[in-house]
Image (cartoon, rainbow, N blue to C red):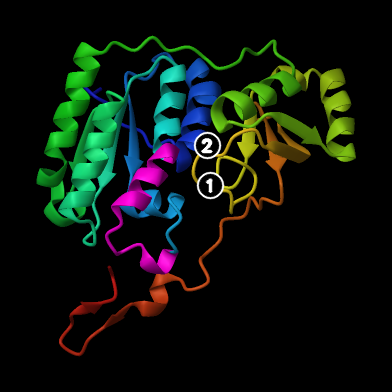
Amino acid sequence: MADYTVTEAGFGADLGAEKFLDIKTPNLPKTPDVVVIVATLRALKMHGGVAKSDLAKENIEALKDGFANLKRHIENIRKFGVPAVVAINEFVSDTESEIATLKALCADIDVPVELASVWAKGAEGGLALAETVVKVIDEDKADYQRLYSDQDSIEEKIQKIVTQIYGGQSVNYTAKAKNQLKQFSQFGWDKMPICMAKTQYSFSDNQSLLGAPVDFDMTIREFIPKTGAGFIVALTGDVMTMPGLPKQPAALNMDVAEDGTAIGLF
């Protein structure tokens, strides 16, 4: 019904995009032509070792260090045979030097990048990104390929995700998870795709392990079969599947002044 259809896969290309490409895409009549990876300078500086309280301050070196995280996301998308475009979600604290640095880092690995200023400029702030996405679709044809096949065992599917997407080296299973693997195989559920439940803050199952960690072990503590939806949820580490609020929700800082002016929205 449209020339272009855009869908949001969920935060973390190692989570949302992987699930979209491995679980949803095989059931769609159309494969993706391009993946837009949304990045912020604040997040990259955090992955470069900057404390959350200092993310608004310019820090070029931390940005360069944190780029390793974004680089892995880009490389992961390319493993699926789909071209990537980086969208820099602009914040008011971003500096021209930081933006220029990130653009240069992206150019070094030959990935298109555009500043997305839609928060400040509305649709006009997204025109450059939209035009670049259309250009990539026209000039860099996708050749989608799935990371694993339905015939792979649950362990094989998880091993491929952990080693090829996350950068880990091995997977450990609790006694409960091992028993479930045997049961699921008997039921024929082992042919379903895997939906990993993992922290969004790290490639590993340890949210404090930032950047682009390698050679770590990941623990699967339990499986939850979603037979109606057609996939198996693998719970890693101590992750919670309930959505949560930060310790200081933004709503606590919001109010309306006597003259009707909104306070604390951004």
Residue at 87% x, 19% y: name it: 186
Residue at 71% x, 19% y: name it: 156
Q: Quadrant of the N terminus?
A: top left
Examine the structure image and report whether residue 60 is included in the region drawn in magenta: yes
Quadrant in the rendering for residue 217: top right
Residue placed under numbered mark 1 in the picture:
200
Q: What span is in magenta?
A: 52-69
Residue 96 appears at what percent x and percent y?
A: 16, 52
Q: Dot 1: few (<14), some (14–19), or many (≥20) neighbours within 10 Å?
A: some
- Does residue 174 appear to the left or right of 79 in the view shown? right
Residue 162 appears at what percent x and percent y?
A: 63, 29
From the viewer's perspective, is residue 61 above or below residue 236?
Answer: below
Residue at 43% x, 50% y: name it: 48
Residue placed under numbered mark 2 in the picture:
15
Three-letter amino acid code of the residue under disc 2: Leu
Residue lying farthest to the left in this orientation? 124
From the viewer's perspective, is residue 140 above or below residue 182?
Answer: above
Q: Main secondary structure of the magenta part?
A: helix
Label 1 and label 2: CA atoms lie apart by: 7 Å
